[in-house]
Image (tube, rainbow, N blue to C red):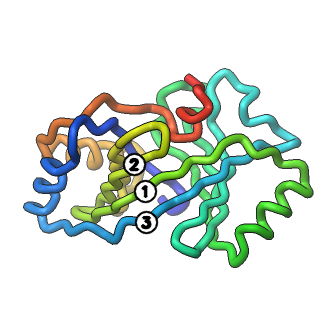
Amino acid sequence: MEYTEIEQKFRLLGTPEELKDRLTARGAAPGRPSRQVDTYYNAPHRDFLDNRVVSEWLRVRVEDGAASLNFKRFHPLPEPVKTHCDEYESTVADAEAVRRLLDALDFAELTVVDKTREEWHVDGVAVAFDTVAGLGDFVEFEFKGDARTVEEATARLEAFIASLDAPLGPRVHLGYPHLTLGLE
């Protein structure tokens, strides 16, 4: 399932300590917190915002002196609740050169998502605690294990989340760029 991302996001209510304690009890340890500044772009040949449900994003990320270019296409395309996405990402040596390249090709900047992320790994799942400027605190669970199908990976991810028996806020079916742009 290379190039396929399966994740679920929730608002965090209160502090994340209870959830972090449960992860620690399972043998997880936190990674070093990092700041991610993600700039999202719209394509000149296909308006990502033109559909009733926005299902595609092009992003340049700068994180701790490194940079990457990323494209995501969420499925099912016309549905507001997504099950997974195609994800193509590669590191880039010079984020400013990529920004200028996109500008020269008439890609328009849509929004910037500035967040601090602390990522934990356990049982084939990445658990990311995000504090997003202007939006608040979230936790994302991303399946990183081996699975043959999206359905199998989703079932295993949901079982992992349920096994934590931790209080989570409401599930969020939108990405951070959706939220910063006020899209439903």
Taking the image as shown, residue 73 lies to the left or right of residue 126, namely right
User: Residue at the location (58% across, 40% down)?
Assistant: 177
Q: Secondary structure at mark 3?
A: strand
Q: Which residue is mark 1?
A: 116
From the top left corner, tell me how far across and down residue 176 is, in percent.
52, 41
13 or 90, which lies in front?
Answer: 13
Three-letter amino acid code at the position of disc 1: Thr
Looking at marks 3 and 2 on the same chain, the residue that comes earlier in the sequence is marked by 3
Which quadrant would residue 167 be assigned to in this image? top left
Looking at marks 3 and 1 on the same chain, the residue that comes earlier in the sequence is marked by 3
2 and 1 marks in contact (CB < 8 Å): yes
Q: Which residue is mark 3?
A: 34
Report the disc number at residue 86.
none
State whether residue 172 is above or below residue 138: above
67 or 144, which lies in front?
Answer: 67
85 or 28, which lies in front?
Answer: 28
Three-letter amino acid code at the position of disc 2: Thr
User: Residue at the location (26% across, 67% down)?
Assistant: 30
Q: Secondary structure at mark 2?
A: strand
Mark 2: few/some/many CA within 10 Å (<14, 14-19, 20+):
some
The C terminus lies in quadrant = top right
User: Residue at the location (8% across, 61% down)?
Assistant: 25
State whether residue 114 is above or below residue 158: below
3 and 1 marks in contact (CB < 8 Å): yes
- The CA distance from mark 2 to mark 1 is 5 Å
Q: How many marks?
A: 3
From the top left corner, tell me how far across and down residue 144 is, in percent.
37, 61
Mark 1: few/some/many CA within 10 Å (<14, 14-19, 20+):
some
Three-letter amino acid code at the position of disc 3: Ser
